[in-house]
Amino acid sequence: MPTLNLNYNIIEVQRRKAVGPYPIQMEYLIVAGGGGSWAKTGNDTVGGGGAGGYITGSYCFSPNETQTFTIGAGGALQTNGTNSTGFGLTAIGGGAAGANINGVATNANSGGSGGGGADGASPAGGTANQGFGGGSSPAGPAVGGGGGGGAAEVGYNAISTAGANGGNGKQWLDGTYYAGGGGGSNYKASGGSGGANGLGYLIGGGGGQGNPGTTGIVGLRYLTGERVVVTNGSSVNVGNFTYHYFTSGTGSIQFIGDEQQDPNINPCP
């Protein structure tokens, strides 16, 4: 009668248990909604809205783990943008612009990035590691509105009757810029030009020259072919990677499990 090798059987069971599913690392982008500017008439000067907060990083998904996200809307005129959330993090909505409406100055609001000042209305600061403050616009010397802060730089200061430019946003892994600040308006009825919006103002950007802020986004990048279940949003494949974008409301992603983990491409600590 043959003898049973119990040690071999134990080792074989352990080996089989160790084969997948593995965790996987995904890269993420979280951008809040941008802050709004003010409606402008010929007698007004308005700053640019601050961009929504910009956060990037990586997250290690366990098999069958689900994460949910909320995407912040852009701020209406005179209001801050709404926060975006994901992975336990909160990107702060952009700050509303400052304005001088018929001689009454209202200071800008702080946010992910701060709103720009306007004809004596003070600019506001941004949030550390999410964005920068707005540009200034001193009272008296007939200068346009300051630019709203962006994810990559402070909004520009107004130095003439023209409005100042908004601060630029940051470029993510997909090559797109996000969270640019809004440009300030010209000085009252001076005929000067308005400032340019910063790079990336179309997504999570501050409103420029009397416009609302733009809606934020949550983006994910993972290896194409990974088994996921996604609620809402849209995907695009670029090279070896899939980019999935959530652009409004709420959404979620469930990672089923990686059967053939490649530590050279998607290592998980």
Image (tube, rainbow, N blue to C red):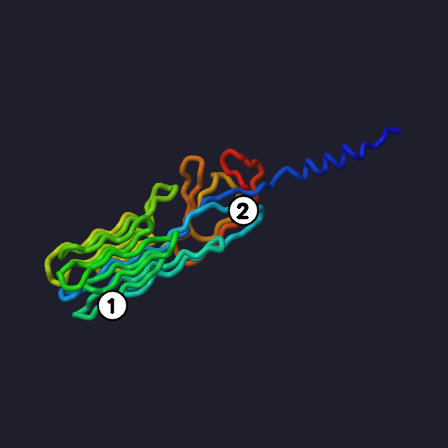
* Quarter placement of the C terminus: top right
Which residue reaches farthest right? Answer: 1
| Circle 2 residue | 61
Identity of the residue drawn at 68% across and 37% down = 16
Task: Write down the quadrant of residue 250 in the picture.
Answer: bottom left
The total number of labels drawn is 2
**Mark closest to the chain's N terminus, 1 or 2:** 2
Left-right relation of 50 to 105: right
Tell me the kind of residue under disc 2: Phe
Q: Is residue 141 visible?
A: yes
Tell me the kind of residue under disc 1: Thr
Label 1 Cα crowd, 10 Å radius (few <14 / some 14-19 / many 20+): many
Label 2 Cα crowd, 10 Å radius (few <14 / some 14-19 / many 20+): many
Identity of the residue drawn at 51% across and 48% down = 229
The foreground one among 193 and 226 is: 193
Identity of the residue drawn at 21% across and 62% down = 118
The foreground one among 26 and 163 is: 163
* As drawn, 23 above or below 8: below
Q: Is residue 217 visible?
A: no
| Circle 1 residue | 106
* Quarter placement of the N terminus: top right
Tag in front: 1 or 2: 1
Which residue reaches farthest top? Answer: 2
